[in-house]
Amino acid sequence: MALKTTPSVVVRILLWAIMLIGGSAGGIWLDLHHFRELFFNPLFHLLTLIVGLVLMRFAFRAAAAGGKELARHGKSGNDVPRLETDRLVTSGIYAHMRHPMLFGLTLVPLALAFLIGSPSYIMFIAPLEMLFIVIMVMTFEERECRMKFGSDYEAYAKKVPAVCFKPKCLKMLFSR
């Protein structure tokens, strides 16, 4: 069964997977050479495991909140590729922020770093990966939305921030 999606989405998913796998391997390698004592500390791993589970839950809740809204209102028919939309969605969480799914997915590298218990990944690599995700969204995703939806997206972007950290928005993003 072939996956019906666009090359742009496939490239972004592959980049994201490479970052997570590479970040994990790089973090562990650095830990074995520079943070060996902390990396092998069971108490540190117990604490980071708890933080990682909480962060991962938040990440997937945010991604699900955005995904559900897109699935409900973003497609005019069945011929739209998976993970794509052909309608500009401005309702629900999208009335408060333009990129709720990607906001949630930005938390995944940090959550994974905590789950692995890698001090190097937590302190150095995950923040860089998170920054890369933000840059990727603000360049590629924004450009694609502007091309796809034109002046409607321009007007929407002037009214709605890319992400929103107001308590009301975060509650809507992270609750069920």
Image: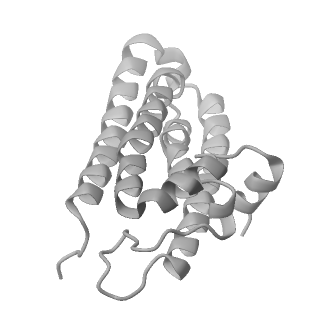
Nearest the eye: 149 or 95: 149
The single residue placed furthest to the bottom in the displayed view is 78
The single residue placed furthest to the top in the displayed view is 34
Nearest the eye: 118 or 71: 71
Nearest the eye: 131 or 89: 89
Query: Is 2 situated left or right of 52 in this image?
Result: left
Name the spot of residue 172 as percent of width and height, x first.
Answer: 74, 62
Residue 130 visible somewhere in the drawing: yes
Name the spot of residue 72 as percent of width and height, x first.
Answer: 54, 81
Please tell me which residue is depicted at 34% across the width and 23% down the height of the picture. Answer: 29
Work out whether 4 lies above or below 18: below
Nearest the eye: 24 or 44: 24
Q: What colouring does the structure picture have?
A: one colour
Q: In which quarter of the image is the C terminus?
A: bottom right
Q: In which quarter of the image is the N terminus?
A: bottom left
Please tell me which residue is depicted at 56% across the width and 37% down the height of the picture. Answer: 114
